């Protein structure tokens, strides 16, 4: 039961199991669907600075961020006092969304190179002053594990550097003994061009440790397939269905061993099948 899963400070533990009626918690009203099929944009860029004061009031600065907060408050106060400044800030926010945030949505601009046209996370859940990583998490799912808990590897490109397209079929081959070295588990997930799951008849969105029907090759390697075309019965167990257009592949490695942690393990090449 979900109501039996409760997290609270150790100091509040009294030896008795605690429960919570999550249905009684306050909730946000359902927003209107995004017109482009992507994630809901809770903050419109042109209104960013209108809402910033409330965010600064509700979220204390991290150590060392006090001066940044002070500068932002000065900007907000100046905008309140002068409509011309308010207009300039709104234009700057819209421009930043277009020139900084949108390109950062491409995985090649996110994290650091991991080999074979993949990138990997670096400061997840330990942002420090890596505000790009902090931005990426805030724009995606708001939750991240620390690098020693989970490594995230991702790409929009195949081994030749061409964008992944559902019209093509791809093979992702892990050499024998070279699946992600983890103490926990790993998965390869496919996302559409909005970084959302692609609905498909198999209701399958990822493959990995949890899948007991994966078929290895005779030499012990493991080839996973991605693309719109059904590979047939022989390959279907290892197949991730893709949409018509662009898509991304994403590896999660939970409780990674040292080659995952230090980056010496490289994700496999994504080869276009003829």
Image (cartoon, rainbow, N blue to C red):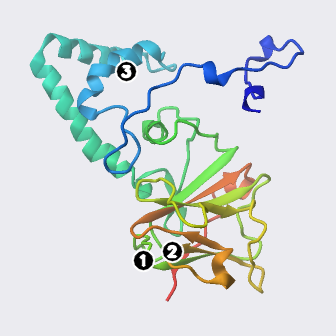
Q: Residue 97 in the image: x percent, y percent?
A: 28, 41
82 relative to 74 in the view: left or right: left
**Mark with earlier residue (3, 1):** 3
Q: In which image quadrant can residue 190 be found?
A: bottom right
Q: Nearer the viewer, mark 3 or mark 1?
A: 1
Against 206, is 178 above or below?
below
- Classify mark 3: residues with Cα within 10 Å, few (<14), some (14-19) or many (20+): few
Instruction: Quickly name the residue at label 1.
Output: 167
Q: Residue 237 in the image: x percent, y percent?
A: 68, 74
Among all residues in the image, which is located at the extreme right? Answer: 15
Q: Residue 55 in the image: x percent, y percent?
A: 40, 19
Instruction: Quickly name the residue at label 3.
Output: 68
Q: Between marks 3 and 2, how big is the CA–CA gap?
A: 46 Å
- If the image is split into quadrants, where does the N terminus sit? top right
User: Are the two marked residues, 2 and 1, in contact with CB atoms closer than 8 angstroms?
Assistant: yes
- Classify mark 2: residues with Cα within 10 Å, few (<14), some (14-19) or many (20+): many
Residue at image position (42%, 77%) is: 167
Residue at image position (22%, 40%) is: 95
**Mark with earlier residue (2, 1):** 1
Kind of element beneath mark 2: strand
Pick whichever, 171 or 264, lies toward us: 171
Kind of element beneath mark 1: loop
Against 131, is 215 above or below?
below
Instruction: Quickly name the residue at label 2.
Output: 227
**How many discs appear?**
3
85 relative to 216 in the view: left or right: left
Q: Between marks 2 and 1, how big is the CA–CA gap?
A: 7 Å
62 relative to 72 in the view: left or right: right
Pick whichever, 255 or 246, lies toward us: 246
Among all residues in the image, which is located at the extreme left? Answer: 84
Q: Between marks 3 and 1, how big is the CA–CA gap?
A: 47 Å
- Classify mark 1: residues with Cα within 10 Å, few (<14), some (14-19) or many (20+): some
């Amino acid at each position: 039961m979900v109501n039996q899963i409760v997290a609270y400070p150790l100091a509040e533990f009294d030896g008795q199991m605690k429960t919570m009626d999550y249905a009684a918690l306050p909730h946000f009203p359902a927003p209107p669907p995004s017109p482009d099929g992507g994630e809901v944009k809770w903050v419109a860029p042109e209104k960013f600075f209108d809402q910033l004061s409330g965010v600064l009031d509700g979220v204390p600065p991290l150590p060392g961020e006090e001066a940044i907060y002070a500068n932002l408050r000065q900007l907000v106060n100046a905008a309140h006092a002068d409509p011309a400044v308010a207009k300039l800030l709104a234009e700057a926010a819209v421009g930043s969304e277009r020139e900084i945030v949108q390109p950062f949505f491409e995985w090649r601009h996110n994290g650091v190179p991991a080999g074979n046209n993949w990138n990997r996370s670096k400061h997840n859940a330990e942002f420090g002053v890596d505000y790009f990583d902090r931005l990426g998490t805030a724009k995606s799912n708001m939750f991240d594990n620390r690098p020693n808990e989970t490594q995230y590897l991702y790409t929009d490109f195949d081994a030749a550097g061409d964008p992944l397209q559902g019209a093509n079929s791809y093979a992702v081959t892990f050499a024998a003994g070279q699946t992600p070295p983890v103490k926990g588990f790993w998965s390869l997930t496919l996302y559409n061009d909005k970084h959302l799951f692609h609905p498909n008849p198999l209701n399958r969105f990822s493959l990995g440790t949890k899948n007991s029907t994966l078929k290895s090759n005779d030499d012990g390697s493991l080839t996973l397939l991605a693309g719109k075309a059904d590979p047939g019965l022989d390959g279907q167990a290892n197949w991730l269905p893709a949409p018509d257009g662009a898509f991304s592949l994403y590896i999660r490695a939970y409780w990674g061993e040292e080659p995952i942690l230090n980056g010496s393990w490289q994700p496999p090449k994504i080869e276009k099948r003829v």
